[in-house]
Amino acid sequence: MADVIKKATRESYGEALAALGDKYDNLYVLDADLAAATKTGIFKKKFPDRFFDCGIAEANMMGVAAGLAATGKIPFASTFAMFAAGRAFEIVRNSIGYPHLNVKIGATHAGISVGEDGATHQCNEDIALMRTIPGMTIINPADDVEAKAAVEAAIQHNGPVYMRFGRLAVPVFNDPATYKFELGKGIKLRDGKDIAIIATGLMVNEAIEAAKVLEAEGVSATVINIHTIKPIDEDIIVEAAKTTGLVLTVEEHSIIGGLGSAVSDVLSAKQPTKLVKIGVNDEFGHSGPAVELLKQYGLCADNIVKTAKAAVAAK
Amino acid sequence: MDATIKKQLEITACKVRLGIIEGVFNAKSGHPGGSLSIADMLTYLYFAKMNVYPDKPDEPSRDRFVLSKGHTAPALYSTLAEKGFFPKEELKSLRHVGALLQGHPCITIPGVDMSSGSLGQGISAACGMALSGKISGDTYKVYTVLGDGEIEEGQVWEAAMFAAHYKLDNLVAVVDNNGLQIDGKISDVMSPYPIKEKFEAFGWHAIEINAHDFDEIDKAFNEAETVSGQPVVIIQKSTKGKGVSFMEDQVGWHGTAPNKEQYDQAVAELSAKLKELEG
């Protein structure tokens, strides 16, 4: 796999904004003193008149985005997930969600793969928080190709969208020539009969790798990529549960309120099926290199293999 | 200000106050004190200042208004009804199940430009609208009204910094300085004073006026229009509960609805005032 290209989805975000700025002249970008890290700096360089730094004031930035949207602009409000979904939660709820304004939130540095900065900056709660806001669309892309497509899909969608991007460079596994992003539609990457692995974000690639290992060891796994966590693709989840009778969710997010919970909501109502969740357990992260942290927290192909085998054995 | 126009504004403000009492009484809850203290300001904005179109509430060129102190929605609703955005009858179902008029301003109500009510947020949205106008070269103005207790919220000062940084001279913020918040006098609870100096330090052009004198209000807005490269704040010294004798300057009337007897008295006082004005 030496030829695998790796790229952080925050890079994809910045590049997509800059590329789409020509096509959508109503697109504006806000940042809160993190343009170098969120990569909106790429847009700023190309469109300096359409970029507004709000300084280290995320609450106001979300409100400004609401005002821009209320007057017909399409603002992308960008900062780390911790501050976008965490600090500014109530502004996102009341000034963006409640009036259902056309604001796009670009939240980078999500999850523990922030790495060395540690727990204060490792946001494992954002999906849970954003899921509770009525009318909020949540996209958690898996790689560069999907992230770029997601940015354009967000522009084309009228309403608030929360997009989750990562700091860590991750393998680009989607083929830009054939990849098609459909908001609210999961993507089945592999068909199996013993277990359905439903993953999101950077865990999708790990799930694909795990499925290959599982196959070699006699376990047949379906792999589904859920890039849109809200609204979630109920049909693909129900179908996978019916086919396999066992579901494993994998996400770089708290096991409380994220993809696992969303899938659980679907299954318990429509297709009661045993569900096992891999995610960040009910604990904070800590400092360390991202890849090591992901391994330590079980957010890797090895742990998916181990967990899937145990679950299948217990069937 | 022209005496005839002033008289007409005083009459309209009196009607707006009657609508506030009507709304809060029928809702059996809500915030009469701070609504009555901004009745003159809203009357001035909607009847003497802003370009708004009751028959085309979403007209893109309209001036924008954000009630950052959203709990005083009865004042906004009464003003909008008086202006013709929706029937005055709607005030009677304020806060009721299935009603048009929600407890706090909601963007889906005709004439309401932004949902608000969680304090400190409206001014940020107003900044966004003003920035948007600057970006597009639009000539509309953006007005927002904040409470003096509201400016204890940190977000207000984030917005204050932003507005000055981006030279939003198409934005006028009004601080309704009635001196009272839920827990008591603002000077006792958490003093935001000195308000004028704070805004000036943040780069704003600040004007202090009497909230209940249309000549002073008019003069302040005329001055605001001469200011370039800076946002303007008008700090209006007001009386909470203004116009209803037993509600004036009483913290207890921040968020309490009048009972039938109190309602009758308030209506009687305001009706007498209206009759006197209409001569």
Image: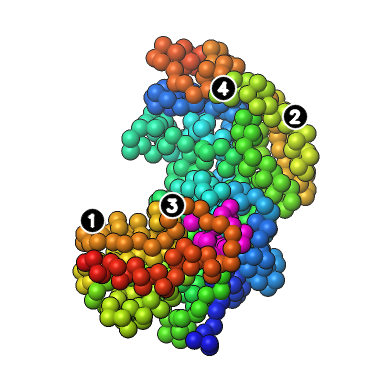
From the image, state whether disc 2 or disc 1 is nearer to you.
Answer: 1
What colour scheme has been applied to the protein in the rendered image? rainbow
Task: Kindly tell me whether residue A39 is visible in this rendering.
Answer: yes
Mark sitting on residue A269: 1
Residue B76 on the magenta span: no
Residue A118 on the magenta span: yes
Mark sitting on residue A282: 3
The chain ID associated with circle 3 is: A
- Please tell me in which quadrant of the rendered image residue A254 appears: bottom left
Residues at discs 1 and 4 both on one chain: no
Residues at discs 3 and 2 both on one chain: no
Identify the secondary structure beneath mark 4: loop
Up the image or down, B10 lies above or below B221; here it is: above
Up the image or down, B176 lies above or below A176; here it is: above
The chain ID associated with circle 1 is: A
User: Residue A312 placed where, x, y %?
Assistant: 26, 70
Which amino acid, by three-letter code, is at mark 4? Asp
Check disc 2 and report the residue beneath it: B194
**Label 1: how many residues lie within 10 Å, few (<14), some (14-19) or many (20+)?**
few
Stretch in magenta = A107-124
**Label 2: how many residues lie within 10 Å, few (<14), some (14-19) or many (20+)?**
few
Identify the secondary structure beneath mark 3: loop
Q: CA distance from mark 1 to mark 4?
A: 46 Å
Which amino acid, by three-letter code, is at mark 2? Pro
Q: Residue at x 74, y 51 (%)?
A: B165
Up the image or down, A215 lies above or below B168; here it is: below
Mark sitting on residue B183: 4
User: Residue A131 placed where, x, y %?
Assistant: 41, 54
Q: Which quadrant is the C terminus of chain A positioned in?
A: bottom left
Judge left or right: residue A139 versus residue B61.
left
Pointers 4 and 2 in contact (CB under 8 A)? no
